[in-house]
Image: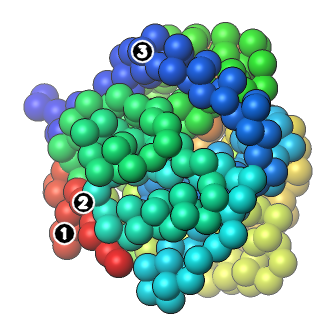
Amino acid sequence: MKLSIMAKEAREVPAVIAKQIEKNDAVVSELASTLKQLNPHLIYIIGRGSSDHAGVFGKYLFETEMGIPVCSAALSIAGIFGKQLNLQGAVAFVISQSGRSPDILKQTESAKKGGAFTVAFVNDETSPLAELADAVIPISAGEEKAVAATKSFIATLSALLHLCARWSNNNTLFESLVMLPELLNTVITSPAQLTSEYLENTRNTIVLGRGFGYAVGREVALKLKEVLGIHAEAFSSAEFIHGPVTLVEKKLKLIALNIHDESAPFHSAMVDDVKARGGECIDLGVTADSNAQAVHPRCSALLLMQRFYLDIERIAIEWGLNPDTPPGLNKVTKTQ
């Protein structure tokens, strides 16, 4: 069977990450030394779409592992309102696949003017963003032709993990990252989790996660919209109980993302609550049978996303949709 571009690119993830780690380790280690000297009090993340979702993952990662506060940039502050922020003592992580979006470049310029040390996580190393930033960590995912990002998103998460491991001197995390490509290959050959039968006739759905699960849940919700045309919204499972749980009465189908980390028992309790209220919910997550116990908990979400991308591509094909070119979307989105 001929594979779509999206499926081919998603299957490249293990090789991309293995190459990325080998290529970037010297650069990442040098940058980690610089960041130790700078000792920033804030990480300011600039990104849109899937890159912004990677930034949410980064927020949980660096706050959990290093205790550094992380916030997301409101791009309109510089681009629309023309205001300058004081970012002295901060480091700005700019995340972009293309490195060419005008609003991303404008916010990066503003961050530098405000005193931030800027680090670009970018796939196109010849882009204006790569030239503008003070330091560059190449995503090294190669050309991504499908509009829906897959390998570039997971590779961005691995680049964030790589920097965190070297910056925090966490050898256990780094060793687990090195093992990740092998585990991702195992996930590629594992059974599907999300099925077309579950999503059949679904117009609206809720994606529930906690912590790192919520971070990638935003990406899951985006892909349900982009690739399948299903309206989806991501919630922290804890936040969902505070009001939005009333939506369960509308007979919405829910998707629960199960990450094997400290949040698991709390997330599970919230999902059980939703199910007890009559919510129809499917659970996604890599089980112990798929080597979940062999991976560092901070890497667990990447395994989940690997499986999800392949599942959603297959569902699109089964529904007669083209996963490579969702209607109305372009690979590079230019906003001010």
State which tag comes first along the sequence, 2 or 1.
1
**Quadrant in the picture for the N terminus:** top left
> Hey, what amino acid is under mark 1?
Pro
Identified by mark 3, the residue type is Lys
Q: Specify the quadrant of the image occupied by residue 174.
A: top right
Rendering quarter of residue 227: bottom left
Residue type, label 2:
Val
Identify the residue under disc 2: 332
Q: Gap between marks 2 and 3, in whole Å?
A: 26 Å
Q: Which residue is mark 1?
A: 327
Percent of width and height locating residue 256: 65, 53
Tag 3's secondary structure?
helix
Mark 1, secondary structure of its residue: loop
Please provide percent x and percent y for residue 140: 35, 29
Query: Does the CB distance between marks 2 and 1 fall below 8 Å?
Result: no
Which residue lies most toward the bottom here?
81
Report if residue 86 is visible in the image.
yes
Mark nearer the N terminus (2 vs 3): 3
Question: Which residue corresponds to the image point at 78% horizontal and 19% vertical from the top-left?
Answer: 170
